[in-house]
Amino acid sequence: MNSMADTDRVNLTPIQRASEKSVQYHLKQVIGRGSYGVVYKAINKHTDQVVAIKEVVYENDEELNDIMAEISLLKNLNHNNIVKYHGFIRKSYELYILLEYCANGSLRRLISRSSTGLSENESKTYVTQTLLGLKYLHGEGVIHRDIKAANILLSADNTVKLADFGVSTIVNSSALTLAGTLNWMAPEILGNRGASTLSDIWSLGATVVEMLTKNPPYHNLTDANIYYAVENDTYYPPSSFSEPLKDFLSKCFVKTCTRGRQPTSYSSMWINSTENVKVDKLNKFKEDFTDADYHWDADFQEEKLNISPSKFSLAAAPLPGQKTIKN
């Protein structure tokens, strides 16, 4: 007969069993689910600091290599508009990635709470910060490859934090795999011609449309028709969009491979015409928050794995009705 202690042990969740590690966490709630696993809000029992814990289950060393590749990328990124990596815990065939907790959830969540989508002025705040994050990533030689509102998180003070680097890759690598989420994907990715930094700018354009209309371009088409439209058609934004915004989108949605190495849409008339938004504040790094819950511990315990990252996978889960693709 099992003892009460044994019964309690069986009923523990995987992350609770991982508390055998030197750093222990108290789970507060599930804040996200997807094909990769579950994301928890958790508190470090020793420091009372809040983190997000991304639980990932893997079946073999190849899948573990994919996860470690994402970790290897994340741990080398340091920018105010990139979600911070704090460490990881490995337990059997489960791995828990410790990340910065973003109290205001995703930009997609914010959009979904609006009846008609965000205003242009509201959107500029988030687009400007996203561009700062992308400019940093591209300067570090990293292509995100899955920019969309669901992967743009917001901290307690609404600072943008780019997240989910599971399908990211390195500039000039052989990134010919079809990866990303269909409605946001650039034509060169759909055509298996390889990703570039400009692929992220295309996806940002689709995200801007998502912000203002609650849906990305071509959301009402079948998958086959989305492929055709992205590759062959010209996107015509709603007539309600301002002319500077239409110009911004035209710079994002350029199909030719001769777009050049750096997108002109890092800066545009639409971004620079911001009204009632103090863009200078968006460039200021806010390393300390006033609320104790948002002071992050930089010295998380980490179990080292003797595995060389091979490729980037672990795609973010799609929203209902959307397809995240990874080959």
Image: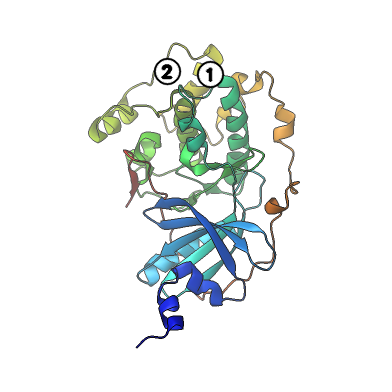
Q: Distance of mark 1 from mark 2, alpha carbons?
A: 9 Å
Front residue of 248 and 5: 5
Q: Which amino acid type is shown beneath numbered disc 2?
A: Pro
Percent from the top left, x then y, of residue 89? 54, 70
Q: Which mark is residue 79?
A: none
Residue 10 placement, left or right of 138: left
Residue at the (50%, 46%) spot, across then down: 143
Q: Residues within 10 Å of mark 2 (few under 14, many from 20)?
A: some
Q: Quadrant of residue 186?
A: top left
Front residue of 26 and 89: 26
Q: Secondary structure at mark 2?
A: loop
In this figure, which colouring scheme has been used for the structure?
rainbow
Front residue of 327 and 319: 319
Percent from the top left, x then y, of residue 228? 27, 30
Residue 248 placement, left or right of 220: right
Q: Residue furthest bottom?
A: 1
Q: Please, is residue 264 above or below residue 11 in the view?
A: above
Q: Residues within 10 Å of mark 1 (few under 14, many from 20)?
A: many
Residue at the (55%, 31%) spot, across then down: 263
Q: Secondary structure at mark 1?
A: helix
Is residue 95 something that shows in the picture? yes
Q: Please, is residue 201 above or below residue 90 in the view?
A: above
Q: Do residues under tags 1 and 2 come within 8 Å of each other at their CB atoms?
A: yes
Q: Quadrant of residue 320?
A: top left
Q: Give the mark nearest the N terminus, 1 or 2.
A: 2
Is residue 312 something that shows in the picture? no
Residue 224 placement, left or right of 27: left
Percent from the top left, x then y, of residue 307? 48, 73
The residue that label 2 is drawn on is 237
The residue that label 1 is drawn on is 245
Q: Which amino acid type is shown beneath numbered disc 1?
A: Leu
